[in-house]
Amino acid sequence: MMTAVGLLAAGLVGLGMVFWTMQLVFAAFTIRRVRTIAGLPDERRETWPRVSVIVAACNERETIESAMAAKMSDDYPNVEFVVVDDRSDDGTGEVVEALAARDPRVRAVHVAELPEGWLGKLNAMEQGRRAATGQWLVFSDADVHFRPGTLRRVIAFAERAGFDHVPVFPALAAPNWVLGAIGGVFNRMLAVMGRLWAVEDPRSKATIGSGSFNMVRRTALERAGGLARVKLDVADDVALGALLKRSGARQTLLVGRGFVEVALYRTVGAMARGSERAPFTTVGDFSFWKMLFFCVAWTAMELGPALAFLPLFPFLPFPVWPVGVVWAALSIGIGAAIDFWLRRKLFPALLWPLGMLLLAAFFLRAGYLGAKRGGIRWRGRFYSTELLRAGRSYRP
């Protein structure tokens, strides 16, 4: 006889298997269609367009010097590095000045005050844009490393194909297996649910951006209305991508494995704190209850098929456990395929349930703190929900 528990379990198993089958299809599309920097030719030209790499830094003394050294090792022949010290109080400004003194390609910009109606990072990016002289602008976080040849490959590809916006999805370096498992789930969800293969299609609403490497043609940014149009978007990288695509800019995405790398958070606690802002404003839409619904539904879809291993289906004339075996193979196989594609270690793919549950816990924590505080704290400043809700331009 069918029980309520059995009926619920059967529904979760069925919905979960549909969810994972969709992930399999979407993962195949992504791996097949999204290009990698490593797959682009290393071209040599007599003339190259001017490129400005704009780095906004707020209290980044521990990471900025090594990251800038990596960026400056790129052998692109016509480049400048505009490094913006955004109200730092840890000595970042002195590091920026020292970099400018050592290398004439570096331009130091210092932000003393934050104007009303701007997020700190967006204002720093805007000040860097104003100081930049390049035809191409590359917005990049202060802890991101480039490998020599990165700019030459990406610029040559964009110029040849006629793209206006080329974000690069970086390689994420994880210091331990727990963070590796969390990073693996994040990569999978972005690659699969972000519909990355459809970014190039002008008819699709799929869009993307990357705080690690967000390259845009200056004229396309100006035609879209500039950074002032996204000045209160916490998810600034994706918001910029959406703005550019709506304006008619041609957009694509590259995978930066082996060429663009950023270190994942050093500890689980640091990752939890770093996850406080964007999930609350985008995934949760400024609501703890929406965040709770999302996390419960996501967990049910991800882990629901595991119920197939439990004796909850006496009303069925056949065993259900083979469905659980298929689910386990799918979940590990999809994660491993994406990790292999990104050239990440494969072991964390086995630990994806732990990574998924921790990521959901981070999201719930972000929703709770955002609702309790009535906004978010970011780079030493508080931004109210009312201000961010009224000023945002991007909705996922």
Image: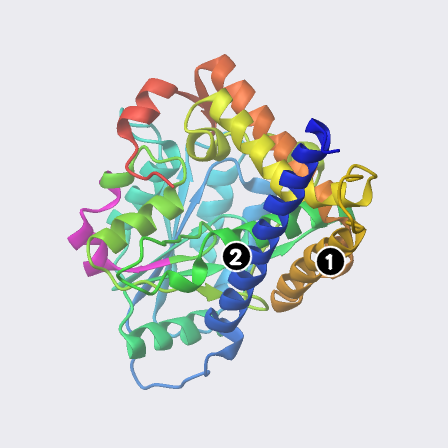
Residue placed at 65% from the left, 67% from the top? 343
Please state the horizontal and vertical placement of residue 209, each as a whole percent of the image: 40, 52
Q: Is residue 73 visible?
A: no
Instruction: Name the foreground residue: 44 vs 348.
Output: 348
Which labelled disc corresponds to residue 87? none
**Which portion, as a residue range, is magenta?**
215-228
| Label 1 – label 2 distance at C-alpha | 21 Å
Instruction: Name the foreground residue: 54 vs 16.
Output: 16
Which quadrant does the C terminus fall into? top left
Please state the horizontal and vertical placement of residue 370, each as a whole percent of the image: 49, 20
Which labelled disc corresponds to residue 326? 1
Please state the horizontal and vertical placement of residue 51, each as a whole percent of the image: 33, 65
User: Identity of the amino acid at label 1?
Assistant: Val
Q: Which residue is mark 2?
A: 191
Res 137 → quadrant: bottom left
Instruction: Name the foreground residue: 234 vs 94.
Output: 234
Which quadrant does the N terminus fall into? top right
Instruction: Name the foreground residue: 179 vs 294.
Output: 294
Contact between marks 1 and 2 (CB within 8 A): the answer is no
Q: Height in image: 294 above or below 261? A: above
Residue 224 is covered by the magenta coloring: yes
Mark 1 falls on what kind of element?
Answer: helix
Count residues near mark 2 (Cα–Cα under 10 Å), then give few for <14, some for 14-19, many for 20+: many
